[in-house]
């Protein structure tokens, strides 16, 4: 929860300000909140905001600029710190929600599909994946069952190199691998059909999985090339059109 005290604590840790300045900036936010109607804006507690648009509106307000100039721009400095704090808080909430989503997705690890030959996997277009909104940001939902089936369909082997075998999973009793969306789910908004389909979920060992997330691009590229070439036709069947250079771009951020 954002309030004057938590804002002051954040300033102390992240802004490297003296106690006197922290107190001034914290009080300045309360003062600005009480004077919003003087700027032709609706009066509200700025500490209750989760959208930083209001801060930009105030900073660009002519009447506020007059007050700010008289106060040696202390008020604009306070607002800019508040904007950073709101963005920091939003990012923390987003990371927590993404972690929860990841934990839910990884439930596939405890599922054991004993007879992969009975799987009925059909590559066809599905409607765009559903999402949850958190502070105006979309978190795309994934079906853990698809991951479980994709891993079983790959016979619990690494699709980059089936010789990659680290250990036996205590859940499945088979080689431990992890499911990975070749086109990451965070780019779902750029596609008309769901990215959460079997054709886009690959089975890879944990080393390849970590490398594809955290490794140097030159090392990722080798993995991406092989996975993409093995899946490009299936992706088309699933309604996903993408070339290798587009895929590279998704892994270069």
Image (spheres, rainbow, N blue to C red):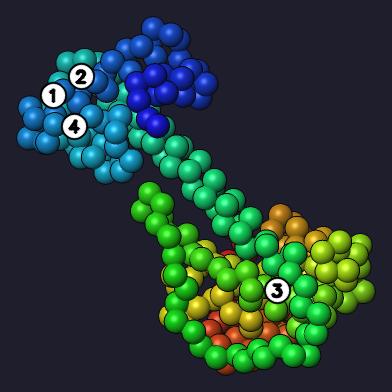
Q: Is residue 152 visible?
A: yes
Quarter of the image holding residue 196? bottom right
**Left or right: 233 as drawn, with respect to 218:** left
Of the numbered discs 1 and 3, the one sitting upstream in the chain is 1
Of the numbered discs 4 and 2, the one sitting upstream in the chain is 2
Question: Mark 1 near mark 3, Cβ–Cβ under 8 Å?
Answer: no
Mark number, residue 35: 1
**Image coords of residue 69 (percent x, y):** 19, 20
Q: Closer to the observer: label 4 or label 3?
A: 3
Query: Which residue appears at 22% of the width and 34% of the height?
Result: 59
Crowding near the residue tagged with mark 2, few <14, some 14–19, many ≥20 C-alpha atoms within 10 Å: some
Of the numbered discs 4 and 1, the one sitting upstream in the chain is 1
Query: Which residue appears at 74% of the width and 65% of the height?
Result: 109
Quarter of the image holding residue 34? top left
Cα distance in 3D space between marks 2 and 1: 6 Å
Q: Closer to the observer: label 3 or label 2?
A: 3
Question: Mark 2 near mark 1, Cβ–Cβ under 8 Å?
Answer: yes
Of the numbered discs 4 and 3, the one sitting upstream in the chain is 4
Residue assigned mark 4: 44
Residue assigned mark 3: 148
**Left or right: 10 as drawn, with respect to 113:** left
Q: Closer to the observer: label 4 or label 1?
A: 4
Residue assigned mark 2: 31
Q: Is residue 182 visible?
A: no
Q: Closer to the observer: label 4 or label 2?
A: 4
SS for callout 3? helix
């Amino acid at each position: 929860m954002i309030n004057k005290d938590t804002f002051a604590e954040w300033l102390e840790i992240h802004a490297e300000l003296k106690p006197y300045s922290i107190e001034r900036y914290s009080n300045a936010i309360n003062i600005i909140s009480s004077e919003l109607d003087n700027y032709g804006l609706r009066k509200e507690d700025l500490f209750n905001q989760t959208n930083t648009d209001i801060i930009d509106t105030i900073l660009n307000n002519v009447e506020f600029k007059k007050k700010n100039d008289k106060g040696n721009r202390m008020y604009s400095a306070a607002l800019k710190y508040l904007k950073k704090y709101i963005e920091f808080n939003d990012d923390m909430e987003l990371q927590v929600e993404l972690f929860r989503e990841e934990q839910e997705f990884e439930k596939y690890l405890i599922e054991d599909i004993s007879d992969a030959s009975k799987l009925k996997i059909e590559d066809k277009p599905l409607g765009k994946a559903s999402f949850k909104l958190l502070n105006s940001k979309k978190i795309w939902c994934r079906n853990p069952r698809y991951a479980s089936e994709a891993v079983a369909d790959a016979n619990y082997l690494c699709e980059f190199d089936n010789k990659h075998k680290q250990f036996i999973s205590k859940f499945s009793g088979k080689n431990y691998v992890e499911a990975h969306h070749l086109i990451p789910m965070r780019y779902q908004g750029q596609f008309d059909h769901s990215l959460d389909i079997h054709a886009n979920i690959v089975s890879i060992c944990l080393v390849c999985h970590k490398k594809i997330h955290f490794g140097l691009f030159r090392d990722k590229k080798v993995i991406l090339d092989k996975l993409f070439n093995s899946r490009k036709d299936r992706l088309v069947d699933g309604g996903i059109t993408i070339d290798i250079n587009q895929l590279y771009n998704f892994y270069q951020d």
